[in-house]
Amino acid sequence: MDYLTLKWLHVLSSTVLFGTGIGTAFGLFVASLRRDRAALAAVTRSVVLADWLFTTPAVIVQPVTGYWLASMAGMPWTRGWLLVAGLVYALAILCWLPVVVIQWRMRALFMPAGDGGRAIPARYWTLFAWWVALGSVAFCCFVVLFRLMVMKHP
């Protein structure tokens, strides 16, 4: 594979990763603030699905294409902005993995979806607080990663 095609794949997967993350987070955050149980049932199902279809493949493609690009360019991973990028990416993924589990648990609270007008369980709000906290750290990490990719220095 040539360098520019690989670079395009890397940028495309980072865009999918970041865009899907922002889009699903916004949807779930707004649905949570509205406290609409039916909306939360639908949104949590969609967020989990989007993570499987879009986010997970992009999470895998990013380090693979990044490593391959660095190797093709003769850049060692052990110094400079690439090392910082690798560490920041690792932190982002360490935050994202529990977020995925939290989203599954949030979704499970609304199954089956047609359970009438019951109140949103208190457990949801505990999970939501963790989801916001970890998701905020991951979001900040991805903003830093975009800067590193463009500026090529910390």
Image (cartoon, rainbow, N blue to C red):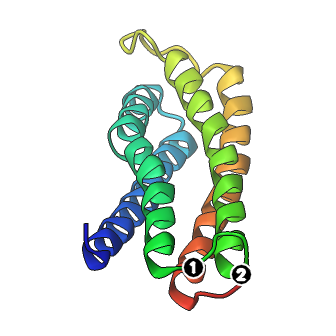
Nearer-the-camera pick, 75 or 115: 75
Q: In the picture provided, is 34 more to the left or to the right than 4? A: right
What whole-number distance in Å separates the C-alpha atoms at marks 1 and 2?
9 Å
User: How busy is the neighbourhood of tag 1: few (under 14 within 10 Å), some, or many (20 plus)?
Assistant: few
At label 2, which amino acid type do we have? Gly
Locate residue 148, reporting x and y percent.
60, 80
Q: Nearer the viewer, mark 1 or mark 2?
A: 1
Q: Of 28 and 115, which appears nearest the observer?
A: 28
Q: Secondary structure at mark 1?
A: loop
- Label 1 close to label 2 by CB (< 8 Å): yes
Q: Residue 80, which numbered label?
A: 2
Tell me which corner region of the image, top left, top right, bottom left or bottom right, holds residue 15: bottom left
Q: Quadrant of the N terminus?
A: bottom left
Label 2 crowding class (10 Å Cα cut-off): few <14, some 14-19, many 20+? Answer: few
Residue denoted by label 1: 75
In the figure, residue 101 lies in which quadrant?
A: top right
Q: Position of residue 151 (x, y in %)?
A: 57, 90
Looking at the image, which residue is at 69% across and 31% down? 127
In the displayed structure image, the side of residue 124 where residue 31 appears, left or right:
left
Please give left or right for residue 31 compared with residue 121 in the image.
left
- For label 2, the SS is helix
- Of labels 1 and 2, earlier in sequence is 1
User: Does 3 sit above or below residue 16?
Assistant: below
